[in-house]
Image (spheres, coloured by chain):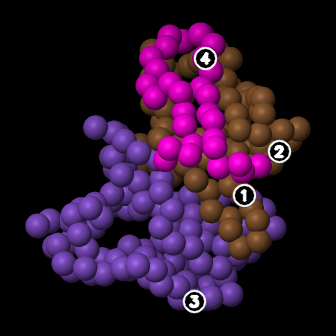
Amino acid sequence: GENVGLHLPTLSVQEGDNSIINCAYSNSASDYFIWYKQESGKGPQFIIDIRSNMDKRQGQRVTVLLNKTVKHLSLQIAATQPGDSAVYFCAETLENTDKLIFGTGTRLQVFP
Amino acid sequence: DADVTQTPRNRITKTGKRIMLECSQTKGHDRMYWYRQDPGLGLRLIYYSFDVKDINKGEISDGYSVSRQAQAKFSLSLESAIPNQTALYFCATSDFAGEEETQYFGPGTRLLVL
């Protein structure tokens, strides 16, 4: 298998439970944030995004929360499923640039 | 992601060899990127291109070069490969049109430099 995420922090959850993955970003000038999911052997896949003028955005089973005061981003996955097992990365984009800055990632493991 | 393809998917090479990784996209996006990913780290930007005549260095461009042959093609070259370039390499595209800034990634190329 892939070595991606070999030493990443890991979150283990029971199938059906909700998952919360956290991310701290460093640059107060970041104005756009994305969560990516990376399954073994694949490239990162877009999950959900949020702009800095929002503090919450919902998708299908996923919610992203943004707290600009403490520069914190979280991804909530409702009713976690085995197919959600992957490494999750947050990424930020500095205002007026198109360059993504990736976090180091969190491995989500879902147990039946 | 079938819209962004990378070749080869796996490559083993020796120190000092020149190799090229290729990326093609059918999304019609103007912007293309090359990243590398190492264990325990997020993706780091090597080079990016906003259109055919535009090439920009990213965070870790030393030891790499790129060529944007067409809107749909962006290749990454290692002029003289070294072992610490062993990594996963990803190509990505984006459109940066209006609210859409998402980057779409290819499946990756695993490179091993002996």
Answer with mark 2 or mark 4, whichever residue precedes in sequence.
Answer: 4
**Eyeballing the image, is A99 above or below A58?**
above
Instruction: Give the amino acid at mark 3.
Output: Asp
Instruction: Compare marks 1 and 2 and give the one earlier in the sequence.
Output: 2
Quadrant location, the N terminus of chain A: top left
Have a look at marks 1 and 2 and say if they share a chain: yes
Number of on-image labels: 4
Chain letter, colour purple: A
Q: Name the residue: 49% across, 38% down.
A: B108
Q: Amino acid at mark 1?
A: Asp
Secondary element type, mark 3:
loop
Q: Nearer the viewer, residue B75 or A89?
A: B75
Question: On what subunit does the disc labeled 4 rest?
Answer: B
Residue hosting label 2? B51
**Which circle marks residue B19 in the picture?**
4
Question: Percent from the top left, x then y, of residue A93?
Answer: 68, 65
Looking at the rendered structure, the kind of residue marked 2 is Asp
- A26 sits left or right of A7 in the view: right
